């Protein structure tokens, strides 16, 4: 056969062959149930939230969130601002309830050559943040932060733009800390979250995927890549990470902001398997685009959010960026997760 007829035969065979079975990757859509007032900075400024749950009155819970050019906002679940504290370039924020009160920690890059942790105590009564001080976190630009509270200890993980992740044991009331471990990724990480039940730390390497580390300092520096940026389930940048825990062992979900396609990828915590993806689309409130930070708490947040609350930064909102609030139960129902 001539080369042309071989080519033609191959084409015909391909045309007659049954179609390859391509697994469908669908992205379901939900709408927001609320939003915060926009941040004051008319630029890329809103970045990352944390949620303080008021156990005695869940509807009176608070959201702490960064304007990465100015400081920290505190919002009610109605989205109204309750307070603001000037803190300059604080990028990400997390909080933990400790014997010393509700401790809020932000990655502080006011000096982009020397990373710091800015510490505050949240007064739930007044919704105000009381500055406790600033803890050195080592050389480099402090970018992401997540906390790990265990009985008797409060640990921060700070991700640095050039790839370093430092683990720092904090004495929050004294505003001091001690670097107890250093990990290294090949490129820029940002979002991180700890599952305190399993002592697992998840870190997003923006262009690469999601890493799991043993959160215990003695475990050594090596991580495991559990989800790769594949342009199907997960698109770069991997931005915010959050967990929605269920039960006391390892139930619930890990959620990642798949920033490049304005969506969120969901993984089951028990086996770290991908279980679906969703988008926050336009509805009564606008949808989310180019989301940076996210936070989720699957507990009861009162009449509006009885099945949990997700807060997601919205990178495209007028007149300025803000944070959207979404019923976590609604996300689970859309993804047919039980
Ligand atoms: Ca942004
Ligand atoms: Ca956060
Ligand atoms: Ca980022
Ligand atoms: Ca939007
Ligand atoms: Ca960010």
Image (spheres, rainbow, N blue to C red):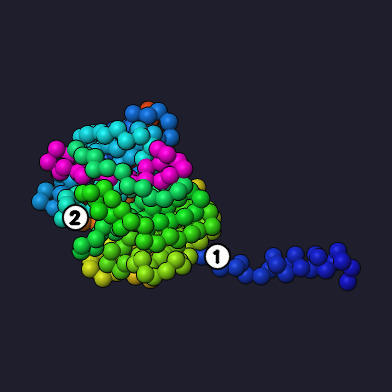
The secondary structure type at the circle numbered 2 is strand
The Cα–Cα distance between marks 1 and 2, rounded to whole angstroms, is 49 Å
Mark 1 or 2, which is nearer the eye?
Answer: 2
Q: Position of residue 302 (x, y in %)?
A: 16, 49
Residue in front for this viewpoint, 291 or 303: 291
Q: Position of residue 159 (x, y in %)?
A: 42, 52
Q: Is residue 83 visible?
A: yes
In the image, residue 334 lies at what x, y percent? 34, 56
- Along the viewing direction, whichever of 166 and 204 lies nearer the viewer: 166
Magenta segment: 106-127
Q: Which mark is residue 225?
A: none
Vertical side of 198 occupied by 168: above or below: above
Farthest residue in the right direction?
2
| Residue denoted by label 1 | 22
Let me know if residue 167 is in the magenta part.
Answer: no
Q: Would you place residue 71 above or below residue 201 in this image?
A: above
Establish whether ligand 2 lies closer than 8 Å to the Cβ of label 2. Answer: no
Count all numbered tags in the image, as a single digit.
2
Residue that numbered label 2 is attached to: 98
Does 258 sit left or right of 197 as displayed? right
**Residue at image coords 27%, 42%:** 133
Q: Residues within 10 Å of mark 2 (few under 14, many from 20)?
A: some
Task: Look at 46% across and 67% down and name the residue there.
Answer: 222
Residue 119 inside the magenta-drawn segment: yes
The answer to whether any part of residue 286 appears in the image is no
């Amino acid at each position: 056969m001539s080369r042309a007829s071989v080519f033609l035969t191959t084409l015909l065979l391909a045309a007659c062959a049954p179609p390859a079975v391509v697994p469908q990757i669908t992205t379901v859509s939900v709408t927001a149930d609320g939003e915060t007032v926009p941040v004051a900075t008319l630029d890329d400024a809103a970045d990352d939230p944390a949620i303080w749950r008021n156990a005695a009155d869940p509807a009176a819970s608070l959201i702490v969130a960064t304007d990465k050019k100015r400081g920290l906002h505190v919002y009610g679940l109605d989205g109204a601002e309750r307070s603001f504290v000037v803190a300059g370039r604080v990028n990400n924020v997390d909080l933990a309830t400790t014997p010393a009160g509700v401790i809020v920690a932000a990655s502080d890059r006011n000096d982009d050559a020397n990373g710091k942790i800015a510490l505050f105590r949240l007064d739930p009564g007044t919704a105000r943040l009381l500055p406790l001080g600033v803890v050195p976190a080592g050389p480099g630009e402090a970018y992401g932060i997540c906390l790990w509270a265990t009985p008797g200890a409060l640990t921060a993980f700070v991700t640095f733009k050039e790839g370093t992740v430092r683990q720092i044991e904090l004495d929050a009331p004294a505003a001091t800390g001690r670097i107890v471990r250093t990990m290294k990724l090949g490129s820029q990480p940002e979002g991180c979250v700890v599952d305190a039940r399993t002592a697992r730390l998840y870190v997003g390497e923006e262009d690469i995927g999601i890493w799991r580390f043993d959160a215990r300092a003695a475990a050594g520096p090596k991580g495991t890549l559990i989800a790769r940026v594949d342009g199907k389930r997960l698109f770069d940048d991997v931005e915010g990470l959050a967990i929605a825990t269920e039960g006391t062992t390892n139930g619930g979900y890990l959620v990642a902001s798949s920033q490049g396609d304005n969506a969120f990828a969901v993984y089951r915590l028990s086996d770290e398997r991908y279980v679906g993806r969703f988008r926050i689309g336009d509805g009564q409130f606008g949808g989310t685009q180019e989301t940076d930070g996210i936070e989720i708490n699957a507990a009861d947040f009162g009449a509006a959010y009885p099945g949990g609350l997700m807060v997601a930064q919205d990178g495209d909102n007028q007149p300025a960026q803000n944070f959207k609030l979404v019923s976590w139960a609604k996300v689970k129902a859309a993804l047919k997760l039980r």
